[in-house]
Image: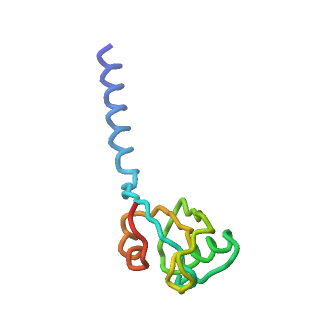
Amino acid sequence: MKTILFALVTILSFSFLTSCGDTEPVLPVLDFRYDQTQCNDPWGYDQDDDKQVALLSAYLAERSIDVSDLLFNGDQDIITCLACDCPTGKVFTLTVEEEDIEALEALGFVSL
């Protein structure tokens, strides 16, 4: 009985030790937003929302910024002015890992 118990404890201890080294560290993720402008966004502009998301996604990918949960929504009727830097009322929201925070903030994204 002691031999079986010893073998079981040894096997379990070995399995715990080997599984700990296989995991990758999990980086914190943060949510950000960006208020779309009339025509001043560096990734360009398109009337179609899906194409607008594709433009931003490609722009960020070119800069090696990995995003998840990229959404684009808002009220199209909210226009405060027609100048290029005025907001359209639409907002991009996305999630990034900690390593991409500075790059997003440099582009005008703000943390939620």
Farthest residue, direction front: 80
Vertical order, 36 against 82 (above or below): above
Residue lying furthest right: 48
- Give the vertical position of 72 relative to 83 (above or below): above
Residue drawn at the location 54% of the way across and 80% of the way down: 81
Q: Where is residue 12, by image quadrant?
A: top left
- Identity of the residue drawn at 57% across and 74% down: 79
Q: Which residue is at a point 36% across and 25% down the rendered structure image? A: 8
Q: Residue 9 is drawn in which quadrant?
A: top left
Out of 111 and 10, give the one closest to the viewer: 111
- The location of residue 107, given as percent across then percent down, is 43, 79
Q: Position of residue 102 (x, y in %)?
A: 35, 74
Q: How is the image coloured?
A: rainbow
Name the foreground residue: 45 vs 10. 45
Which image quarter is the N terminus in?
Answer: top left
Using the image, determine if residue 63 lies above or below residue 8. Answer: below
The percent coordinates of residue 95 (x first, y second) are: 47, 61
Left or right: 71 with respect to 98?
A: right
- Expressed as whole percent of the image width and height from the top left, the position of residue 25 reads 36, 55
Q: Nearer the viewer, residue 17 or 43?
A: 43
Count of numbered badges drawn on the protein: 0
Q: Looking at the rendering, in which quadrant would you find the C terminus?
A: bottom left
Is residue 72 toward the left or the right of residue 2 in the image?
Answer: right
